[in-house]
Amino acid sequence: MTSKPPMTEDRRSEKRVSTNRPAKWVGLSGVYEGRLEDISLGGCFVNSDGEVEKNELVSLEIELLSGEWLSLRGEVVYIQSGIGFGLLFNFLTDDQERALMELFT
């Protein structure tokens, strides 16, 4: 019998904060709206019923606290069917990183 790591094991190295921000995203299957459940400088979890595939590149827009929309791109690294997906920000610019910091203050 092989053992799996516990589901609660967190391999993320960035500080993650809970949020409930509006989001829009575009993937291979279309354009969708959703909500950000949590976010870090390394990635986020998008609550949405849109279809994604693991390793798919997604364009994401997040509404910042200022009301402005921040455009990001990321790779789908986790899918929770019917609930949403985890996105890894592997293309952040310095300006995008600074804008994301607004959500941590």
Image (cartoon, rainbow, N blue to C red):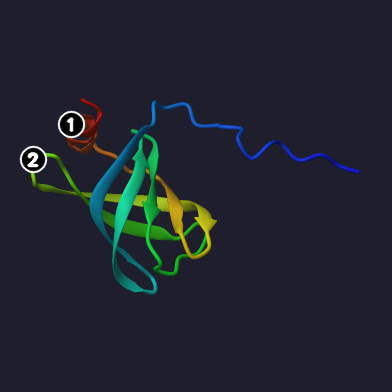
Name which quarter of the figure residue 97 lies in: top left
Circle 1 Cα neighbour tier, 10 Å, few/some/many (<14 / 14–19 / ≥20) = few
User: Mark 1 is on which residue type?
Assistant: Glu
Circle 2 Cα neighbour tier, 10 Å, few/some/many (<14 / 14–19 / ≥20) = few
Q: Earlier in the sequence, mark 1 or mark 2?
A: 2
Residue 33 picture location, percent across and down: 27, 64
Q: Answer whether residue 90 is visible to the viewer in this image.
A: no
The residue beneath circle 2 is 66
Quarter of the rendering occupied by the C terminus: top left
Residue 22 picture location, percent across and down: 23, 53
**Which residue is drawn at the image coordinates 18% and 31% (left, top)?**
102
Name which quarter of the figure residue 39 lies in: top left
* Disc 1 + disc 2, Cβ < 8 Å: yes
Residue 57 picture location, percent across and down: 40, 58
- Specify whether 90 is left or right of 80: left
Q: How many labels, in total?
A: 2
User: From the viewer's perspective, is residue 67 above or below residue 50?
Assistant: above
The residue beneath circle 1 is 102
